[in-house]
Amino acid sequence: MRQDEDYAVHTQNRIIERQDRGAVRAQSDGLSVLDTMRAIRDGRLPPPPIARLLGFRYVGAEPGEIVIELQPEHSLEKLSWNA
């Protein structure tokens, strides 16, 4: 990637926050995978960092089926660079 005097104009930063894995693991201790997914869906457990990064959220959690919705973040748009 070429850097020039306009580099700062073309730069975007993004911060992804996440909870301590140990604390989340303790909160979900004893839950089945399905119950864990339901807890994330219902907001009782935080979503995994990848969900925040990519912009998806759990909307359904039933036996044999997990449903997510993807709302791509602006930062994931296709970028083209002139070399």
Image (cartoon, helix red, strand yellow):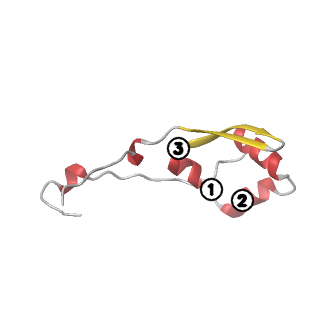
Give the residue at x 41% y 51%. Answer: 14
Marks 1 and 2, how far apart in space? Answer: 7 Å
Task: Determine whether label 2 and label 3 are within 8 Å by CB.
Answer: no
Give the Cα separation between the discs numbered 3 and 1.
17 Å
Q: Are marks 1 and 2 in contact (CB under 8 Å)?
A: yes
Q: Identify the element where label 1 is drawn.
A: loop
Q: Is residue 12 above or below residue 66?
A: below
Q: Earlier in the sequence, mark 3 or mark 1?
A: 1
Which three-letter amino acid code belongs to the residue tagged 2?
A: Ala
Left or right side of 51 for 16: left
Crowding near the residue tagged with mark 1, few <14, some 14–19, many ≥20 C-alpha atoms within 10 Å: few
Please indicate, yes or no, whether residue 37 appears anywhere in the rendered image: yes
User: At 87% across and 56% down in the image, what residue appears?
Assistant: 30
| Viewer-proximal residue among 79 and 59 | 79
Amino acid at circle 3: Gly
Q: Residues within 10 Å of mark 3 (few under 14, many from 20)?
A: some
User: Going 83% across and 57% down the picture, which residue do you hit?
Assistant: 29
The one nearer the camera, 23 or 49, is: 49
Rate crowding at label 2 as few (under 14), some (14 to 19) or many (20 or more) other CA atoms within 10 Å.
few
Q: Which residue is mark 3?
A: 55
Residue that carries the numbered disc 2 in the rendered image? 23
Q: Viewed as shown, does residue 48 lie left or right of 39? A: left
| Disc number for residue 19 | 1
